[in-house]
Image (spheres, grey):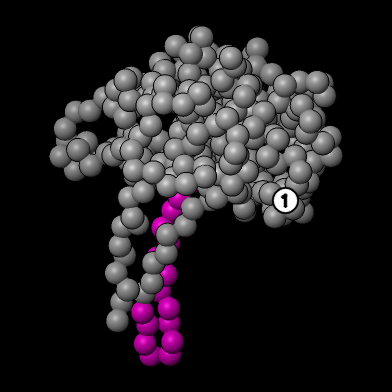
C-alpha cells in the first residue's frame, strides 16, 4: 500500500516552545526573529523484488539553531518553507512584527508564487519588494546559505537580481553557486577579534564542508572567508542598507554543510547570538 504524501502539520515553532499565534512586537522586552525556510519533504520509492511502495518524510534543519538560542533575548518564530508560501505577510504591518528576518534554504519562487498567483493568476503584493523596503527602513535581514538560498543548486534558489538581493551585502552568481568541500575547510577570520560578531568566539573554528559562492559588495565588511586554497570566497559578510542592516552567512545552520563538530562547538551559540545582536542594535 502506498503511503500518501500528506502536508506536515501547520505549527509555528518558537525557540523554547510551540505557540499558536504570531507575537506582537511589544509583548515582551525581547527581540522578535522570524526564521523562514529550513524545511523540506522527501518522497521515496522502495523496491523489494517484484513489489514496491512509497513513503514520505518531513524534515527540518532548524533544530540546532533553535536549540542554540534558547534562553536568550531573542524570541524566534519558525515558519517552515511550505507555510511561508502562503503565510509570510503581504504587507508592511505584518513584517513590522519582527526585528530580524532570516531567510534560510528556501527559494525565491516560494515567495513569488503563492497558489493565488501560480494557480489562479491573481495579483498579489511582491513580498521580495516588501522585504527589501522593510530592511531599508530599519529591519535586520539575514540570508543563510543552502541549496536554495543565494543562487543555489542548479541556480534554483533564484535570488540573483531580486529585490532581496538588493538589500544584502553580497550579490549572487547567475548559476549553480555551491562550493562542495568534502574534505572540509577552516574559516579564515579577517575582522579583528574585538568585532562585535566575533566577541567571545574562539579563533579556531571547526571544519565546514560547503558553502555558497557569493561576491561582497563595495563597502561591505567581510568578517570571514574560505581559505585561499578554496578560492577565498566570502563566508560571513555584513552591510547596511538604508537604515537597516543585513548579513550574508554563506554556509548552513546545520548539516550537511555544518558537521556535528561545528554544532557541538562552544562558539556555535555565541556566533549566532552575536550575528543577531549585530542585526538589531539597541
* Residue 73, quarter of the rendered image: top right
Residue found 77% across the figure and 26% down from its top: 199
Closer-to-camera residue (141/221): 141
Q: Position of residue 111 (x, y in %)?
A: 35, 35
Residue 52 within the magenta-colored segment of the rendering:
yes
Closer-to-camera residue (35/45): 35
Position of 208 relative to 22 (above/below): below
Look at the image and tell me in which quarter the C terminus lies.
Answer: top right
**Residue range (magenta):** 37-53
Q: Position of residue 192 (x, y in %)?
A: 82, 21
Mark 1 packing: few (<14 Cα in 10 Å), some, or many (20+)? few
Relative horizontal placement of residue 137, taking residue 7 as reference (left or right): right
Relative horizontal placement of residue 281, taking residue 183 as reference (left or right): left
Furthest toward the bottom, the residue is: 50
Residue that badge 1 annotates: 264
Furthest toward the top, the residue is: 242
Residue found 31% across the figure and 77% down from its top: 2
Principal SS element in the magenta part? Answer: strand
Relative horizontal placement of residue 266, taking residue 93 as reference (left or right): right
Residue found 33% across the figure and 38% down from its top: 21
Helix, strand or loop under label 1: helix
Closer-to-camera residue (6/112): 6
Residue 51 within the magenta-colored segment of the rendering:
yes
Q: Position of residue 1 (x, y in %)?
A: 29, 81
**How many callouts does the rendering have?**
1
Q: Position of residue 209 (x, y in %)?
A: 70, 49
Amino acid at each position: 500500500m502506498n503511503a500518501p504524501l500528506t502536508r506536515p502539520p501547520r505549527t509555528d515553532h518558537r525557540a523554547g516552545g510551540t505557540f499558536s499565534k504570531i507575537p506582537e512586537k511589544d509583548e515582551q522586552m525581547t527581540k522578535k526573529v522570524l526564521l523562514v525556510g529550513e524545511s523540506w519533504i522527501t518522497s521515496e520509492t522502495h523496491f523489494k523484488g517484484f513489489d514496491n511502495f512509497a513513503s514520505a518524510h518531513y524534515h527540518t534543519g532548524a533544530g540546532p539553531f533553535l536549540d542554540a538560542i534558547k534562553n536568550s533575548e531573542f524570541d524566534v518564530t519558525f515558519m517552515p518553507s511550505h507555510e511561508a508560501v502562503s503565510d509570510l505577510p503581504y504587507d508592511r504591518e505584518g513584517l513590522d512584527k519582527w526585528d530580524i528576518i532570516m531567510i534560510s534554504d528556501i527559494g525565491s519562487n516560494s515567495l513569488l508564487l503563492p497558489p493565488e498567483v501560480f494557480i489562479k493568476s491573481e495579483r498579489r503584493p511582491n513580498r521580495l519588494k516588501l522585504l527589501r523596503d522593510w530592511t531599508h527602513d530599519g529591519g535586520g535581514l539575514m540570508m543563510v546559505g543552502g541549496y536554495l538560498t543565494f543562487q543555489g543548486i542548479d541556480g534554483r534558489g533564484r535570488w540573483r537580481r531580486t529585490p532581496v538581493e538588493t538589500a544584502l551585502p553580497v550579490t549572487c552568481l547567475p548559476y549553480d553557486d555551491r562550493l562542495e568541500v568534502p574534505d572540509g575547510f577552516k574559516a579564515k577570520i579577517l575582522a579583528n577579534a574585538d568585532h562585535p560578531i566575533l566577541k567571545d568566539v574562539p579563533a579556531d573554528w571547526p571544519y565546514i564542508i560547503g558553502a555558497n559562492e557569493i561576491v561582497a559588495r563595495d563597502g561591505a565588511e567581510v568578517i570571514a572567508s574560505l581559505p585561499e586554497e578554496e578560492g577565498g570566497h566570502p563566508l560571513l559578510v555584513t552591510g547596511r542598507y538604508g537604515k537597516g542592516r543585513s548579513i550574508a552567512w554563506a554556509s548552513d545552520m546545520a548539516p550537511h554543510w555544518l558537521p556535528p563538530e561545528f554544532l557541538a562547538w562552544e562558539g556555535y551559540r555565541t556566533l549566532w547570538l552575536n550575528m543577531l545582536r549585530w542585526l538589531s542594535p539597541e
